[in-house]
Image: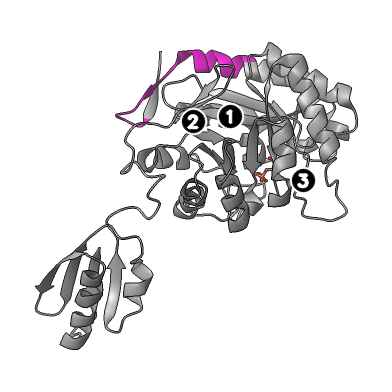
Amino acid sequence: MIIIMERGAAQENINKVVELLKQNEFKTKVNVGDLYTVIEGFGDKTTLTPGRIAALDGVKEVKTIREPYRLASRDRKEEDTVIGFSNGVKIGGDNRPVAMVGPCSVEEDYDGLLKVALAAKEMGCEFLRGGAFKPRTSPYDFQGLEEKALKYLKKASEETGLLTVTEIMDAGDLELICDYVDVLQIGARNVQNFKLLKAVGKCSRPVILKRGLSSTIQEFLLAAEHIMYNGNSQVILCERGIRSFDSTFTRNVMDIAAVPVIKKYSHLPVIVDPSHGTGQRYLIEPMAKAGLVVGADGVMIEVHHDPEHASSDGKQSLPIPLFKEVMNRINCLTDRLHYDKNCLSVNIE
Ligand code: PEP
Ligand code: MN
């Protein structure tokens, strides 16, 4: 840590900082300049947070050298995390990017879900995703079929061999959801629901963690850290767009740069969700491709058998014929991509 004291800080205040560092087994060095004193502290105790030092009188600024998200950081683990599944599918590292597709909400019509699942399978996708517990802005909107949806997902998975993903909103549903699906999703609205992060941290299922509507990248990585700190290192980060001042043309601003930034600072796999990232059907293909070109380990795309009558997010859902065309072109691109770790980007051959 680097602690910059206020101009002309009292010796007593400088001593207090040094004492606190030493109590926490930090090696210290005090640099006295003409105007400012700068204290260097080298140590590994997580108990001594920058906030505790910043609260001392006379401290102007505290800078940490290590990233605050320790387990998620590349400082801790240089090589990419790869998450594997029993059927051989792998996410992360040099593995081929995956595709997670399906309706925003699983609906009463099982055949509709099956049509999407069969199309996903045909197009080489690995995961069927669908909401059972829906986080809706309005209480009047469709809230999800809950266990019935989980049963549908499992049935569609048994019929197609696809792995399944669904969102968890309440830690109390964890056991139930784990009985039916392979991967848990924590949605943008729950990225800082720390009890929920802790609960999924204690289970052994991979977790897709979506970036919050106003999460900084650091806050996003610290949310992942909560899951990892509680014991689950199988975290997949998902860039799904953030709120900004202009929502005239797109629902959110999809932060493409977040992909290589996160890959530089973290070893965790990153996927992109252009459906929520843009809210526009016509933007899904270009933004999915953009995400892949900057190194995403997968894409999440909403697909519906009848988007005009979807219970949620119909506007951003691809109808099956268009999905097949788009996925075909995404697959052509994916076939030619080679991730280059040194320049944090992808070569197209
Ligand atoms: C979803 O995946 O359907 C969803 C609600 O996503 P987000 O949390 O990114 O809004
Ligand atoms: Mn949705």
Residue at 33 percent of width and 67 percent of height:
48
Residue at 27 percent of width and 83 percent of height:
58
- In the foreground, 185 or 290: 185
Q: Mark 3 sits on what residue?
A: 134
The picture quadrant where one finds residue 177 is top right
Give the image location of residue 198, x and y in percent: 57, 52
The reply to whether the C-beta atoms of the residues labelled 3 and 2 are less than 8 Å apart is no
**Does residue 116 lie above or below 257 as drawn?**
above
Residue 299, numbered label: 1
Crowd class of label 1 (few under 14; some 14 to 19; many from 20; radius 10 Å)? many
Indicate the quadrant containing the C terminus: top left, top right, bottom left or bottom right: top left
**Does residue 59 lie above or below 298 as drawn?**
below
Q: Which of marks 1 and 3 is nearer the N terminus?
A: 3
Q: Which amino acid does label 2 sit on?
A: Ala
- Disc 3 beta carbon < 8 A from ligand 1? yes
- In the foreground, 181 or 216: 181
| Circle 3: element type | loop
**Does residue 135 lie above or below 79 as drawn?**
below
In this rendering, which labeled residue sits more in front, label 1 or label 3? 3
Is-magenta flag for residue 2?
A: no
Label 3, label 2: how far apart the Cα atoms are: 26 Å
Label 1, label 3: how far apart the Cα atoms are: 20 Å
Residue 280 visible to the viewer:
no
The reply to whether the C-beta atoms of the residues labelled 2 and 1 are less than 8 Å apart is yes
| Circle 2: element type | loop
Residue 85 visible to the viewer:
yes
Indicate the quadrant containing the N terminus: top left, top right, bottom left or bottom right: bottom left
Q: Mark 2 sits on what residue?
A: 296
| Circle 1: element type | strand
Give the image location of residue 192, x and y in percent: 58, 56
